[in-house]
Image: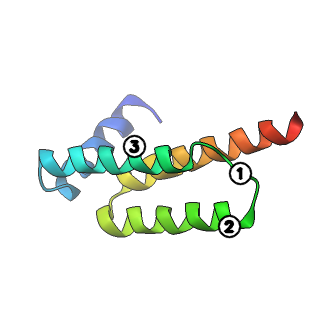
Amino acid sequence: MNLEEAHLQIKEMWKAVKSKNEIAQLILDLWIFLKNHWQVKDTDEYWEQVVKDQNDFYKKYKCDFAIDLIFACTNELERRVKKMREM
């Protein structure tokens, strides 16, 4: 993503998110998602909960910015599981 694309995405986020308080809540909810899933587990139950929480997050915010953030977090969880498997 180049700087212009990032700027456009931020503008879209501001349109989609109604207030600064909502942005703060989005970041808090993202933190809670990470806190709840940071200790990765290689089980179906773990990943089912990750997907459920992802969907809940998207349904709450419904903007590209939120989708990008939650998928970035999930990609990190997947990376951590792959690393765990290699050990």
Q: Earlier in the sequence, mark 2 or mark 3?
A: 3
Mark 3 neighbour class, 10 Å CA radius: few under 14, some 14 to 19, many 20 or more: few
Mark 2 → mark 1, Cα distance in angstroms: 9 Å
Residue 20 percent coordinates (x, y): 13, 44
The residue that disc 3 covers is 31
- Tag 2 residue: 45
- Cα distance, mark 2 to mark 3? 21 Å
Q: Are marks 3 and 1 in contact (CB under 8 Å)?
A: no
Extreme-top residue of the structure: 3
Amino acid type of the residue that numbered disc 3 sits on in the rendered structure: Trp
- In terms of depth relative to the viewer, which is nearer, 43 or 5? 43
What's the residue type where badge 1 is placed? Lys
Query: Contact, CB < 8 Å: mark 2 with mark 1?
Result: yes
| 9 left or right, relative to 72 | left
Identify residue for label 1: 41
Q: Indicate whether 6 appears above or below 74.
A: above
Residue drawn at (29%, 50%) of the image: 26
Residue 83 is situated, as x and y percent measured from the top left of the image, at 78, 36
Front of the two marks 2 and 3: 2
